[in-house]
Image: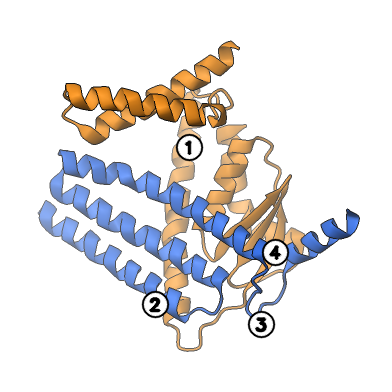
Amino acid sequence: MNELIGLIIITVGVVFDFFGVLGLLRLPDVYNRLQAATKCITLGTCGIMLGTFVMNGFTGLGIKALIAIPFIFFTAATGSHALARGAHKFGIKLWHKSVCDKYREKVTTDKGNK
Amino acid sequence: MEGIAMRYFVLFLFAFVMWLILTWPADWQHIIVGVIVSIIVMVLFGRLAVVGEVKMFDPKRWAWFIVYLVVFIWECIKANLDVAYRVIHPRMPIKPGIVKVKTNLKSDIARTFLANTITMTPGTLSVDVDGDELYIHWIYVRDETVEGATKYIVGRFERFLAKVFE
């Protein structure tokens, strides 16, 4: 029974991972792609980990899989934040159909004040 | 001074316990390597640890933290379905942009959690924090003004985080 539930969770995780990769390929600019990468791929990978835990229970492998989940969450969120900020500082433009960019307004006014 | 020593010690303990869980069952070789690695981590990152900013032994805060976790996981699943929908839709209904929001949270750790939560929830990704202003990349901008965006993005989590951390 545990085996079956674990396999179902792993399948759901792989499906989310697939959507994440599809997002990386289809979305237009680096910021939108980061969105797909952080959300879908984090939940997908966490699903795979959780499935592994359900299949193995409280063994060495299962516990390790369970502990990996919060680490993935924190590193994915922090890493995507660093990448987005770095990309913006480097001057990578938003997609041409983007509606607004408050951050650039702020950066230019900051420069003007100095 | 005592506070700083405590900070280093708690970080060491955390790293070491984490190591023990990861290498279980423990034997002498694991423990020795674990102590060495934990000391290295402690020396490198001790000054960055946030021990003491959080009042850890208050059960009410833990209860709110669990409420927050449930809300967070639910929003996270919604985020995934939302992004998946935009990705597989043939015309890709996206309207991206970077908006500015304001937060009332004061402590660094609460703001860190807020920024990470925003990154994990539907269509939003935090780009930069400047004092009490956060710059958020939004995959479908519903409201360009500061007040509107704040209501949509921050409002859902701020009250929980305020109860947990402040």
How crowded is the residue under tag 3: few (<14 C-alpha within 10 Å), some, or many (20+)?
few
Type of the residue with mark 4 = Val
Residue located 49% across and 43% down the image? B68
* Left or right of residue A94: residue B31: left
Q: Are marks 3 and 2 in contact (CB under 8 Å)?
A: no
Chain B in the picture: what colour?
Answer: orange
What chain is tagged by disc 1?
Answer: B
Chain letter, disc 2 residue: A
Report the amino acid beneath label 2: Leu
Residue at the disc numbered 2: A22
Q: Which residue is mark 4?
A: B99
The residue at 40%/65% (across/down) is A40
Rounded to the nearest angstrom, the CA distance separating label 2 from label 4 is 26 Å
Q: CA distance from mark 4 to mark 3?
A: 16 Å
Work out whether disc 1 and disc 3 sit on a shared chain: no
> Residue visible at 50% across and 88% down?
B91
Q: Gap in Å between the C-alphas at discs 4 and 1? A: 28 Å
Structure colour scheme: by chain
Q: Provide the secondary structure element on which disc 4 rests.
A: strand
Residue A102: x, y in percent? Answer: 75, 65
Question: In the image shown, does B125 or A112 lie closer to the viewer?
Answer: A112
Which residue is denoted by mark 3 in the rendering?
Answer: A96
Label 4 Cα crowd, 10 Å radius (few <14 / some 14-19 / many 20+): many
Give the image quarter of residue B136.
bottom right
Residue corresponding to mark 1: B65
Sequence-earlier tag: 4 or 1: 1
Q: Secondary structure at mark 1?
A: helix
User: Disc 2 to disc 1, how far (Cα)?
Assistant: 34 Å
